[in-house]
Image (cartoon, helix red, strand yellow):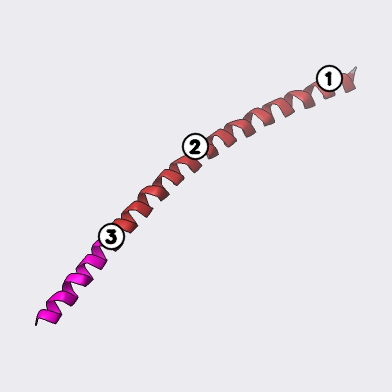
Amino acid sequence: MEANMLGLEQRIETLIGECKRLSSENRNLKTEQHTLMSEKTQLKEKNRLACSRLEKIVAKLRTLEDQ
């Protein structure tokens, strides 16, 4: 009976430790996800600006070509 209780206590402690580890990992992953989403937003904006600039360059080239 005593051995069963000790085994159960050890199992509970193991589960508590695993729960804490997973909780910490989850927090880290959420932080990383937030960072990646911010980077994605920034890259999309840079891409939009690059496309806009490229369109302006193409328009200028067409204007020069027509002259």
Q: Nearer the viewer, mark 3 or mark 2?
A: 3
Q: Amino acid at mark 1?
A: Thr
Most common SS among magenta residues:
helix
Q: Which mark is residue 19?
A: 3
Q: Residue at x 34, y 52 (%)?
A: 24
Q: Is residue 2 magenta?
A: yes
Q: Earlier in the sequence, mark 3 or mark 2?
A: 3
Q: Position of residue 61 (x, y in %)?
A: 84, 24
Question: What residue range appears in magenta?
Answer: 1-17
Which residue appears farthest toward the left when viewing the image?
A: 1
Answer few, some or many: residues within 10 Å of disc 3's Cα (few below 14, many 20 plus, some between 14 and 19).
Answer: few
Q: Which image quarter: residue 3?
A: bottom left
Answer few, some or many: residues within 10 Å of disc 1's Cα (few below 14, many 20 plus, some between 14 and 19).
Answer: few
Q: Nearer the viewer, mark 2 or mark 1?
A: 2
Q: Is residue 9 magenta?
A: yes
Q: Earlier in the sequence, mark 2 or mark 1?
A: 2
Q: Residue at x 28, y 60 (%)?
A: 19
For the C terminus, the quadrant is top right
In three-dimensional space, the C-alpha distance between marks 1 and 3, rounded to whole angstroms, equals 65 Å
Q: Amino acid at mark 2?
A: Ser
Q: Nearer the viewer, mark 1 or mark 3?
A: 3
Out of 23 and 67, give the one closest to the viewer: 23
Q: Position of residue 38 (x, y in %)?
A: 49, 37
Q: Which residue is mark 1?
A: 63
Q: Is residue 7 above or below residue 59?
A: below
In three-dimensional space, the C-alpha distance between marks 3 and 2, rounded to whole angstroms, equals 29 Å
Give the structural element (helix, strand or loop) at label 2: helix
Q: Which residue is mark 2?
A: 38
